[in-house]
Image (spheres, rainbow, N blue to C red):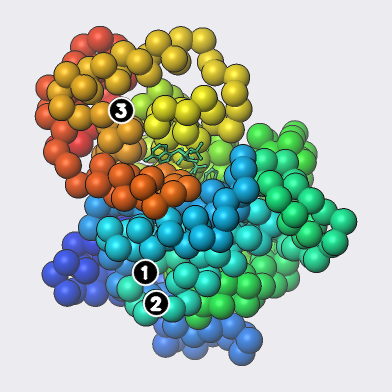
Amino acid sequence: MASRRDFLALSAVAAAAGVAAPRLMAAEKGGDNEQGRRDEALPNNPPLAMDRFPPEHKYGVGGTQMGNMYRVTSNEEARAMLAAAWESGTRYFDTSPWYGLGLSERRMGHFLSDRDPSEYLLSTKVGRLLTPDASVGSVGMWKGNLRTDYRYDYSADGVRRSIEDSLQRMGVSKIDLAYIHDLSPDNEDMGSQWKEYFEIARKGAIPELERLRDEGIIGGWGMGVNEIEPSLAAMDAGNPDVILQATQYTLLNHRDALDRLFPACRKRDVSLVIGAPLGSGFLAGSNHWMYSTDIPDGFAEQRDRISAIAREHGTNLRTAALQFTAAPDVVGATIPGARTAEHARENQASMTVDIPAEFWDALKSEGLIESDAPVPG
Ligand SMILES: NC(=O)c1ccc[n+]([C@@H]2O[C@H](COP(=O)([O-])OP(=O)(O)OC[C@H]3O[C@@H](n4cnc5c(N)ncnc54)[C@H](OP(=O)(O)O)[C@@H]3O)[C@@H](O)[C@H]2O)c1
C-alpha cells in the first residue's frame, strides 16, 4: 500500500504510467464513495482528482505574486504567467484567500476554470474569511486597491465556509489540498497567541478538514506555515496529508528542517510542499530574503559563492536552489512563486536539467550546505 508520504511522488509516476496510484490514498481514508455526512453545497469530485496529480518534476507554481506581493501585477501579466506555466508543463498551482485578499484566487481560478479539472492539482488555504470593504487599499505586502477585509476563523464552520467561498471565488469545481494558513508564531496578528488559535483549530479546523477529506470534498489537508513548530503540532493533533512548509528549507537555511521536520514527516507519512524555495526572491537575485530587506549576515557572500560555483559547473543559482528543495524523499513538490511568463518558463526549465554531482560535492566540501543535506541525483 502506498504511504501517505509517498502520494505526491507516486502520483507523478502514476500519471506517467497511466495508473491511478493515489486512489490508494482515497481508499485508505474511506474513499470517495463511502458513506459519510456530505454537504450538498460542496462538490463531490476530489479525492478522485488526486488520482491524476501530474507533476513530472516535483514542481508547482506559487500564488503570492498573483496577489500583488510587493507590487501591483496587472491582470495581463498574471494571465501571461499562468499561461506560460501551463504551456511549459506546470500542473500544480497554490493560492490562498490571503494572497491579495482574494485577488490571487480570482486570477488563478479564472485561468484554471477553463481547464479540465483532472489535469491539474490546486491547493488553497483556510483560516481567514474575507469581507468586501470599500475603505481598504493595500494590506501589508499586498498592494493595490484590494477593497477587502479579513478576519481569522479556525473553527469547523469557518473552515467549511472558507472552502465554499474559495470554490465560488475561483469558479472551479474542486480543491485538492486545503492548508491551514499562517497559524504560526511568526504571524504578526497572533505572535505568542498562536497557541490559542491552534487550540481552536485543534477542536475545529483540523477535525473538520478530516471530515471534508473523508466526504471527498477536498483531497487532503495540512498546514501552510512559515515555522516548524505548528507543523509538528498539527501532526500531533490530527492526520495531515501534506504540509506546505515555507521559509524553512532552502539552500541557505535547512538545518532545523533536517533535524526536526523531516524525521517527523517520515514517521507520520506526511509529504512536504516547500514554499518560498527562493527565499522570497534572494536566491533568484533579488534583495528580499524571506519577505524582508534585512539580509542575515553572511548570506550575500554565501549566495555569491554558490552562484560562482554553479557557473563553474554549467548551471545557475536559481536552478540549484529549486532542485535542492525538491531533492529530499519527504518532499512532494517545490513551489516557487513567479511574477512573469519568463519566470514561469525559467523555473519550470530549472527542474528539468541535470546538475553535475560535482557541484553538490563542491558545496559540501566548502561547507556551503550541510553535509547530510539530500541533493538531487
Ligand atoms: N505560509 C504559507 O503557506 C506560505 C508562505 C510563503 C510562501 N508560500 C507559497 O510558496 C510560494 C513561493 O513563495 P514566494 O513566491 O513567496 O517566494 P519564492 O518562491 O521564494 O520567491 C519568489 C520570488 O522570486 C523571484 N523570482 C521567481 N522566479 C524568478 C526567476 N525565474 N527569475 C528572477 N526572479 C525570480 C520573484 O521576485 P520578484 O517578484 O521580486 O521579481 C518572485 O517574487 C508562494 O507563492 C506561496 O504559494 C506559502
Identify the residue position indicated by label 3 in the image: 317
Q: Amino acid at mark 1?
A: Tyr
Name which of mark 1 and mark 2 comes first in the sequence.
2
Q: Mark 1 and 2 residues: CB-CB less than 8 Å, in contact?
A: yes
Where is residue 102? Give x, y as percent: 66, 61
Q: Secondary structure at mark 3?
A: helix
Q: Is mark 3 within 8 Å of ligand 1?
A: no
Identify the residue position indicated by label 1 in the image: 120
Q: Which mark is residue 115?
A: 2
Q: Quadrant of residue 92?
A: bottom left
Q: Secondary structure at mark 2?
A: loop
Asked if residue 233 is positioned above or below residue 282 in the image, the reply reads: below
The one nearer the camera, 285 or 298, is: 285
Q: Amino acid at mark 2?
A: Arg
Where is residue 200? Give x, y as percent: 73, 55
Where is residue 107? Give x, y as percent: 55, 65
Where is residue 97? Give x, y as percent: 64, 60
Asked if residue 268 is positioned above or below residue 213 in the image, the reply reads: above
Q: Which mark is residue 300?
A: none
